[in-house]
Image: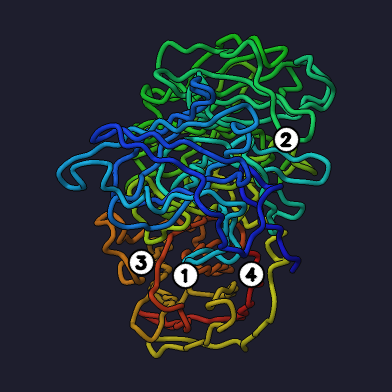
Amino acid sequence: MKNISRHIQPFAAAIALGSASMASAALQVHQLGSDNTLVRITGDNERLLIIPVQESMPDAKIEVLVDGKVEDTFYVRLADSNIDYTVPFDLAPYLAKGEVLLNIVSEVDRTHSRSASEFICWDEMKTAGNFDSSNTEKYRPAFHHTPLYGWMNDPNGMFYKDGRWHLYYQRNPYGSKWQNMTWGHSSTADLVNWEHHDDALRPDGLGSIFSGSSVVDKNNTAGFGNDAVVAIYTSAGKSQIQSLAYSHDNGSTFTKFKGNPIIPNQREARDPNMFWHEPSQQWIMVLADALEQQMQIYTSPDLKDWTYQSSFGKGYGSQFGVWECPDLMEIEVEGTKQKKWVLVCNINPGGPFGGSATQYFVGDFDGKKFTTKTPSHVAKWMDYGKDHYATVSWSNAPEGRHTVIGWMSNWDYANEVPTMQFRSANTLPRDLGLFKDADGEYYLSVRPSAEVETLRGEESTFPAANVGAEAISYKLPAANDGICEIVIDYSAKNCKDLEFTLSNEKGEKVVMKFDVEKCEFSMDRTASGLTNFSRKFPAVTTAPTHNKKAQGTLRIFIDRCSVEAFDGNGRFAMTNLVFPENPYTDLIVSAQGGRAKLNNVTIYSLNATN
């Protein structure tokens, strides 16, 4: 696998990685009171301010003043008594304009120091010419996309153009908990090896940069030029409104539209997702009417002037929590020439096993209105794990593909998982299809994108075997902390349960099981490793298999902190985080209530990309 360039955002060109050296401090710290501190930047030789962070602290508000004028505001959990890690702030854009002063207001209470003047951060805050973002975390995934450091949640603004898949994502550049929402940016030529770029969209006077989407405006409908990339996103200040930005360099940099906001909503609405609708020759936007549990549909000739047309969702599917991160796409039904429309709706809470999840509806769309014949009480889920959320597709994908990626976490515990240098990864990229089941309903098929197979390294194939109550054990690869892909062709029609257990020498385990009678697949992570960081983390998740024959192929992907299971025909997907204290070393297979046949077991070591 090729080496991935590892840059620091938002100042990629200035960073030299692998070095921890720092210049002598060029700071003057003035304590004005128990909660107010001024930091004067006295030199311009070093462009980075290295800020110590303590995650148990409340956010401090930092205003960046240039010649007395507030140029920027951000929030950091400044270290009081302990430094968990540091984050960089790029001073260069401000130093170029004049004298820089930081006006810092810290929240002080009896659980911490009585005065901000006692904080350890003032002694350890320094300027530097570089920042070391190399990985120091045991649970950082080996082959899933992650931010270099800091917090990440929803994927945003994804598009394909000129041979590259662009992924933007909700990001906090100044800590590993949610705050300072910014669009981070990575891209890839193969959906596997990711290159990190500068942050693409940063907060402004209209608010933080929440989720949205991007399109390639091939015919210059917006007036920004042929093939301009146009992004529409939610500006989240006191209210949530929709704003536009455009790019002439394939999404590396964006210019915010002077006419923002383009949709000044009267109530909480967010996460615009748009696409070109060829039959009606107009742009379509789906906007989450978050608290009303519905999606709004708008139309536009030019991506700037939008007309409300209809809403869908009242009383349909899961009505708990808020509706977010929509998507709408037309997909051909497998084995037919028929096409149906799929409306994706991410919700939190309200998932089948608590917290966040991705539901969808299958129906028809006429350019103005989405309808479905599925009974209103039926909820369909794209993934039946606990850790699959905010899933949306790449626009302009090649060959008519519907390729999606999700946030691999859950709002039940996302801020508390046992990592600190970074928090959260994306799921594997997946391609969607549509099939009609025996019940007459249409369901999404979900398969790992074909590019994922390029991760495969050494292959171990085992002969066919019959299995019963006496288990068969297979060794997992030791390379890269045991990360691997397991492919099992099975027949379970002559048993009650077929069970697959991942385990290590500490007795930590993940138990996956086919219940033949119920036509269900389950995953139990209650004893998977570290689980006590949240009472909502231990879980058993269950998926319908849509397979009454009880035979087929199971694919399991194991990374350092995740297990993703897929039916070989895409009939179910299940994504769960796990935090074993030691890597899993064994796959143990057994059957209850009869015998099952393993027609083939193949285990691939996977090459690390992080």
Q: Which of the labelled discs sits on residue 138, or is there none?
A: 1
Q: Please name the amino acid that badge 4 sits on.
A: Ala
Measured as percent of width and height from the top left, residue 403 is found at 66, 46
The foreground one among 580 and 513 is 580
**Residue under numbered circle 2:** 251
Q: Residues within 10 Å of mark 1 (few under 14, many from 20)?
A: some
Q: Does residue 389 lie above or below 234 as drawn? A: below
Report which quarter residue 376 is drawn in: top left
**Residue under numbered circle 3:** 525
Quadrant occupied by the C terminus: bottom right
Q: Please name the amino acid that badge 3 sits on.
A: Arg
Q: Which of the labelled discs sits on residue 524, or is there none?
A: none
Marked residue nearer the N-terminal end (4 or 1): 1
Q: Residue at x 29, y 50 (%)?
A: 80
Q: Please name the amino acid that badge 2 sits on.
A: Gly
**Residue under numbered circle 4:** 608
Quadrant occupied by the N terminus: bottom right
